[in-house]
Amino acid sequence: MKSKTALTSLLAASVMAFGFSQGALAQNTVKIGSVLSVTGPSSFLGEPEDKTLKLYVDKINAAGGVAGKKIELVIYDDGGDANKARTFATRLIEDDEVIAMVGGTTTGSTMAMIPVFEEAQVPFISLAGAIEVIDPVRKFVFKTPHTDKMACEKIFEDLKKRNLTKIGLISGTDGFGASMRAQCVKVAPNYGMEIIVDENYGPRDSDMTAQLTKIKNTAGVQAVVNPGFGQGPAIVTRNYAQLGMTNIPFYQSHGVASKSFIDLAGAAAEGVRLPAAALLVGDKLPESDPQKKVVTEYKQAYEGATKQPVSTFGGHAYDGLFILVEAMKRANSTDPKKIRDEIEKTKGFVGTGGIVNMSPTDHLGLDLSAFRMLEIKGGDWNLIASGS
């Protein structure tokens, strides 16, 4: 009987000790959530985001964490499905009890998750491109990539320099493609652009020669712009070359700012122009460029760890994570509301996408100077010289 009592006491003590250790562990960690499209049709975006977050959370934790707390990263893969994304967002809030979220690979998944984080009053830093993510401004929602509206403006700025004003559009019907098309139509008059033919294609389409033939046969087209992301723009680019349209200047969006686009499009990508982050041309930036150190170090770290080419999409995740970490340090708190306030106060943050200056009316914090106009030459990204 005595031994049984002793055993009971020992078990109770062990349970108590385990409880205390778990409590101590919980007190010394902080959970950050992420929902990414690691697999599926948007995996070329989500995979580098996933690898970037894991790489840098490990680095942060190895260096002591944030304000003495280690980060516990909770990642779910939505496979590009917006309904799954919303389910995982709810799980992050209700089950995982995260204090903030860095994720949302696509515009569709981001828009599906926004109500969850807004209602929970937990800061959400999206990695999606469309302007509708942060316009209108929502209190707890921020984003790191340049907007589709900015991409249209940068492209039209370049076209204006080249005295090309009559435009053909061919857009993806996905969330990003449709949003960017709408933005291009909206801002075109501001740059003296006239959209004289407007075609589109579905996310599963495997041939766009019919739409491109219509554009080719439209009299007066001086340049073509392709809002879209994923494999669609690569197919459009190959079809463009097959139809012998390479004498007409061709522009893509920052939705293809990955080496995988060049690989998919092959030789047809030669001469394509697009606006993108400085990250893709870090080695070509002058030493005086304030982003050179950041983008060069990120490129070296990412490529060294993954043995894969760097992409702007992983860079968006890097920026989102460190905007959050810096805000947590300033807040000196794990309170989501205090962290939200500090994210909104972000000033002079030098990231891979540009220099970020947020405000209560701007939850992106980038202007057109953050975009670089690039041209694909020799299978690589090249900076376009001013005025060329």
Image (spheres, grey):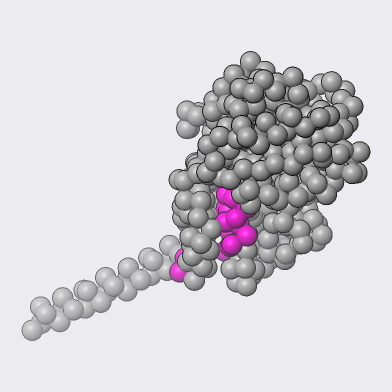
- For the C terminus, which image quadrant? top right
The percent coordinates of residue 130 (x first, y second) are 69, 50
Q: Nearer the viewer, residue 8 or 188?
A: 188
Position of 274 with respect to 38 (left or right) is right
Residue 199 makes an appearance in the image? yes
Question: Residue at the location (25% across, 77% down)?
Answer: 12
The percent coordinates of residue 278 (x first, y second) are 71, 32
Q: Is residue 276 magenta?
A: no
The image quarter in which residue 24 lies: bottom left
Question: Residue at the location (39% across, 66% down)?
Answer: 22
Q: Is residue 223 above or below residue 69?
A: above
Question: Residue at the location (77% across, 32% down)?
Answer: 218
Position of 223 with respect to 9 (left or right) is right
Question: Residue at the location (91% across, 44% down)?
Answer: 190
Q: Nearer the viewer, residue 257 or 177?
A: 177
The percent coordinates of residue 149 (x first, y second) are 77, 46
The image quarter in which residue 119 lies: bottom right
- Judged from this view, the residue extending furthest toward the bottom is 1
Magenta range: 95-113
